[in-house]
Amino acid sequence: MSVEADIAPTRTSGFGHLGDRIHRVLRRYAIFLILTALIMLFNAAEPAFLRVNNLFSVLQSVAVVALLGIGVTMTLAVDGFDLSVGSIASFTLMLSSYAMVVLQLDAVETVALALLAGASIGLINGLLIIGLRIPDLLATLGMMFLLAGLQLIPSAGRSITIGLSLPDGSVAGGSFDPNFLAIGRYKLWDVVPLPVIVVSVLAIAFWILMERTRWGRVFYAVGGNETAAHLAGAPVKAYRLAAYIISGTLASLGGVFEAARVGRGDVFAGSSLLLDSVAAALIGFAVLDQRHANVFGAVTGAIFVGLVLNGLTMLNVPYYTQDFVKGIVLVGALALTFGIGRGRR
Amino acid sequence: MSLLVSTSKSSAALRLAGMDKSYRPMRVLDGFDLSVGRGEVVALMGANGAGKSTLAKIASGVVQPDKGRIFLAGREVNLGSPRAAREAGIIIVHQSPDQLGVPGLSVADNLVLDGLCAGGIGAFVSKRQIHLRARAVAARIGLDVPLDRDFGELGPAHRQLVAIARAVAADAAVLVLDEPTATLAATEAGRLFEVIERLRARGVGILYISHRLADIHRVADRIVVMRNGRLVSEQVRPFDLAAAVKAMIGRNLDQFGARRASALVGRLILNLDRACLTSSSEPFDLSIHAGEIVAITGALGSGKSRLLRALFGLSRFVDGRVDLDGVPWRPRGPAEAIARGVFMAGEDRWRSSFLPPSTPGADLAGTVALPHRRRWFRLGFVQGRREHAAAQRAIGTLGIRCSGTRDTLDLLSGGNQQKVVLGRWQARPCRLLLLDEPFQGIDVGARRDLIAAIRAGARDAATLLATSDVEEALEVADTVAVMRNHTVICLPGLHTADSSAFLAAIGAVEASKAAEKGELIP
C-alpha cells in the first residue's frame, strides 16, 4: 500500500461551502444570465427587438461570425491562433464577386473556387507555422495583411459591381448569379435564412467532432501537450495543419455568405469580422466555465456579440461606439473566465 | 551505529553527533554520526540521495541540521553560516562548479577571494600585491594557471583546482572535499593527492566525499558508507571495496542473482544484434524474453533514454539489427510502435504523458484511453463507458487513490500519477513495454506498488526499463544492464553473475553521475 496522502485537499474543500457553490453556478451560467438581462433590457426599451424577423436578421449576421469563431476555436484547440480569418472572409468575398462579375463563372464554380481558396490559404498558414516554425500569431498576422492588400489589386481598390471597369479600360461583362445570391438571401418558410441553417448544421457537426469523437480528443491533446500527444501515437503535425485548413475553409464560406447577402464585392464588408469572431471564440472560454476553446462557446459568444450590437443599434447608440462596446464585452468575459476566484486550474 | 572507535573522541578534528535533517517528506539525515580525526582522511561513500551533500553542507554552515551537535577539536560549535564555519576552521570545496569561484573576476582575484571578502587585505590593493599573494596560494598546490584569466573562462578542472588551492591556503583544521576528482584528469588528481598527503602530515582532518573507488583506495584512511541518511558500514585499511559498494547499494548481489535464476523466461521478443545508437558509439547486443524485466542503468546522457526512444520509433539506430518477435523492427514513429504493441511511458510524466488539467480528455479515464483510442473507438465516437471501465480496472489493479475515473491528474499524488501512467500502458496487452524513469519523484511505498505492478504485468510481454538509480534497477529487474557512452558496457549473463565486473560497472555509473551532477546542477 502506498503511504501517501489521499487526494489533494483542494477538491474536498471546494464542495461543502454554499458560497463556493453559488459562485460556481454563477460562473458557469454567467454569460446566459447577462444575455437574459440584456434581452429584457432591450425589449423593455424597444419592443421591436424581440420580433421574429429582427431576431433572424441578428442570427443572419451571427451566422458568419459563428462560422469564423468555430474556425478560430479549432486553431485555439491545437494551441494556435488564426488572425487571418477576417481577411480570408473579405478576400473570398472579393474573389467570388470577381469570379462572377469578371470571370463570369456560375454559382457552383464560384463557391467551389472560394472554398478552395480558403482551404489553400489555411494550408499556407499551416505550412508557415508548422514547416517554417513561424509563431502562429505572426504568420497569420502576416497573412492577414497580405490578403487585405491582395483583395484590392484586381479591382484597383474599388468595390466590385456589375459593369466594373477594369484596369485595362474594358468593362466586366458578368453579373451575380441569382443562385449565388440565393445562398445569402433565401429564407426557409420566409423566416429562417439559409446561412443560419447551414451554420447550425456545421456547428452541430463540429461540436460532435470536438466533444464526442476521438479526433476531437486528439485536437485538444495536441493543443494541451504536443509531446504527450505525439508519444500517444497522434500525428500532431497533421492535426495542426488540419486545424488551419478548417479555419481557412470556414472563413471562406463566411465570405461567400457575406458576398451573397450584400450582392457586391464591397471592399469594407468584412472589416469587423476578425474582432467579432475572435471575441466570440474567446467569450466561448467563459461559457459553462469551460476554460478552453470550444464550439458551443464560440457559437454562444457570436450570438452574444450579435445581440448586443443589434440591441445597441436599436437603442440608437452611435455606430462608432460599437467596437468599444465589443471590447468591453470581450475583456469582461475574459476577466470572468480567468480572473475571478480561480477555483481549480 | 559506530562500528569502530578510531580516534579518541575528544581529540577528533571534527565530530558530528546525531545529525537529523528532513526536507519535508524526505528524511535526508537520520541520526548520523561521523568523526574525522586530526591528520585523518575519511572517505564518505553513498549512492545518490544518501545524504552526503547535505552532510557536507551542514559541516560548512550552509544548511542547519534539525537536530544534532557539532564538535571541533572537542569543543561544541554552532555553525550558523558559511562564514561561521570558515572562522571555526572548516573549509569546503563544493562539487558544483558554480560555487567554486566568481566568474568575471580574474584567477588571481579568486585565489585571494577569502582575503578580499573577509578583510585581511587593505581597502586599496594594487594588482601587483594581489598577484603576489595569488601566486603564493597557487604555489602551495603547484597550480599553474594564468593569473589574469577570467575565472569564468576556465574549464571545470581548473576551476576545481583554483577552489582547492584557495581552500588549502585557508589553513583549515578540517577540509571537506565534495567529489574533488570528478572533473580532474589523472595527473591533476595525482597532484591533488600529493596536496592531501601534505595536509594530512600537518594534522588537517579531511572528509573526502567520492564515488571513485580507486581514489578512495589511494587516499583514505577510513571509509564511511552512508545510505538513506544513516551510517551503514565503516572500514579501516585494508579495504574491502566490494563490500563497501554493496553496503552503498544496500543489497546483496547473490540474492539478486538467485531471483534471476528462478525467473520464468518465455520466447525471445526483442533482439538487438550489434546495434549502434550513435555513429561514434560501440555496437552492443541485447535480448529480452517474454516475462523478463531488463533494467538499464547509467548516468544522465549515457544513452538509456535514447535506446528506448529508438525502439519506440522516435529516433533510429545508426547500425545493427533489431528484431521484434523475429521480424526486423524499424518503426517510423510512435503510432506504428503502438499499433504493433510496443508501448513507451516516457520520463517526466507531466511532459511526456499528461495533458494540462483544463484540456478536454485530461481526466484519468481520458489519459488512460488516449493511446488506445484507435482500438477502442473504432467508429470515432468516444465511448465513455469503455474508457471508464478501463480506468476502473487500472485503479483496481494498481491501487490508485482517487475519487473517480473523472478526476483530473493534478488532484492525485505523484505516486498515484505514476500509477496512472503505468495503468495506461497496461490497459491493453503489449509485446514490449518501455519504461523511462518510472519511479521519478515518488515515495518508497508507491515505488513498491509500482514494482509489484510491473512484475505482475510482465508475464507475456518483455519489459525494458531505464533508470539512473542502481538500487531501483536491482529491485525491479531480472537482468540489469549498465550503459555508458551510448552502449551497454556490462550485461551479466543470466545465471553467472560476474559480480566483481558488475560492481565495477556500477561504481563507474555512480562516479559519472557525480560528475554529471557537478556539471549540470547549479
Image (tube, coloured by chain):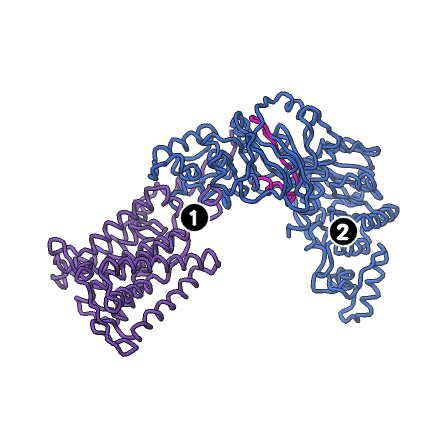
Whole-percent x, y for residue B150 in the image? 73, 64
Q: Judge left or right: residue B224 versus residue B329.
A: right
- Image depth: mark 2 or mark 1 in front: 1
Estimate how packed mark 2 is, as few (under 14), some (14 to 19) or many (20 or more) residues with alpha carbons within 10 Å. Answer: many
> Observer-nearest residue: B361 or B302?
B302
**What's the distance in space between the residues labelled 2 and 1, CA to CA?**
52 Å
Q: Which residues are magenta?
A: B288-308
The colour of chain B is: blue
Q: With B109 as the anchor, is A82 left or right in this view?
A: left
Question: To which chain does the residue with label 1 belong?
Answer: A
Residue at 78% x, 37% y is: B223
- At mark 1, the secondary structure is helix
The label shown at residue A280 is none
Q: Quadrant of residue A157?
A: bottom left
Choose between A223 and B242: the one closer to the eye: A223
Q: Amino acid at mark 1?
A: Val
Q: Is residue B66 visible?
A: no
- Report the front residue among A302 and B289: B289
Q: Amino acid at mark 2?
A: Ile
**Residue of label 2:** B91
Spot occupied by residue A74 in the image (x, y as percentages of width and height): 35, 52
Q: Secondary structure at mark 2?
A: strand
Q: Is residue A288 above or below residue A308?
A: above
With B506 as the anchor, is A115 left or right in this view? left
Residue B483 within the segment the image draws in magenta: no
| Image location (x, y in percent) of residue B179 | 74, 46
Instruction: Specify the colour of chain A.
Output: purple
Residue position marked by numbered label 1 in the rendering: A222
Q: Same chain for labels 2 and 1? Say yes or no.
A: no
